[in-house]
Image (tube, rainbow, N blue to C red):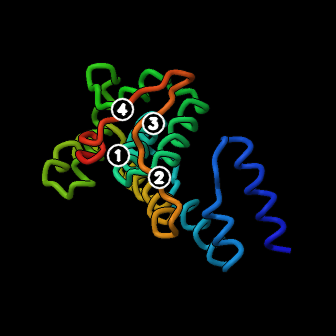
Amino acid sequence: MIRWFFSRQLNAFERTWNYDAGYAREVLEVDPMALIAFMMVSGVLGNRKGAPPAARFAVSLVAVMAEDCGPCSQLGVDMAIAAGIDPKVICAVAQRDYAAMPEDMVLAVRFAEASLAHSPAADEPREEIVRRWGRKGLVSLAMAMTAARMYPTAKYALGHGQACMRLTFAGETATVSPKLRAAA
């Protein structure tokens, strides 16, 4: 019964987002409780309080691109656009075109890049995030980065990962430089 229910959920997700959830089907077949636990952890990490949606989508995209999974990155782009974030701004995040991003997103991207690099350069944007959105905003961004990395990590470990080279933003395709992915 659990397999049937989650299989239907995966079908709906795939149709909605034009996304191959084959890795999740594999986990469902092998260990349904592992999939449930994975989804629960992801849901808990997907804390949506405290920081503006655009900043959360920005850190999520930087984090998922750091894991180098094209389909996961495309899913993040599509979800951001569906949430009302301007496709041109999401493209700017993916290409690290800081001049084309609003100030809040520049802050979020710089914070995500430095945090993912384990760099002390994260201190300054972290302090600014706390000043603007409080500790709750900082937690929200940290959890968004963590959740975004879970999926491509699991996909690559299961043999379903694919490299990210091009992303589509509301019908417009843009090439993503490997250098930018590595910098993330």
Instruction: State left or right for residue 90 relative to residue 17.
Output: left
Q: Pointer 4: residues within 10 angstroms few (<14), some, or many (20+)?
A: many
Residue appearing at x 47%, y 44% in the figure = 73
- Res. 134 mark: 1
Query: What amino acid is found at the position of numbered circle 4 in the picture?
Result: Val
- Residue 91 percent across, percent down from the top left: 41, 27
Query: What amino acid is found at the position of numbered circle 2 in the picture?
Result: Gln
Q: Are the two marked residues, 2 and 1, in contact with CB atoms closer than 8 angstroms?
A: no
Considering the numbered disc 1 on the image, is that residue within a helix, a strand or a loop?
Answer: helix
Query: What amino acid is found at the position of numbered circle 3 in the picture?
Result: Pro
- Res. 93 mark: 4
Considering the numbered disc 4 on the image, is that residue within a helix, a strand or a loop?
Answer: helix
Separation of disc 4 and disc 3 at Cα? 15 Å
Residue appearing at x 51%, y 36% in the figure = 77
Residue 95 is drawn in which quadrant? top left
Which residue is label 2 attached to? 162
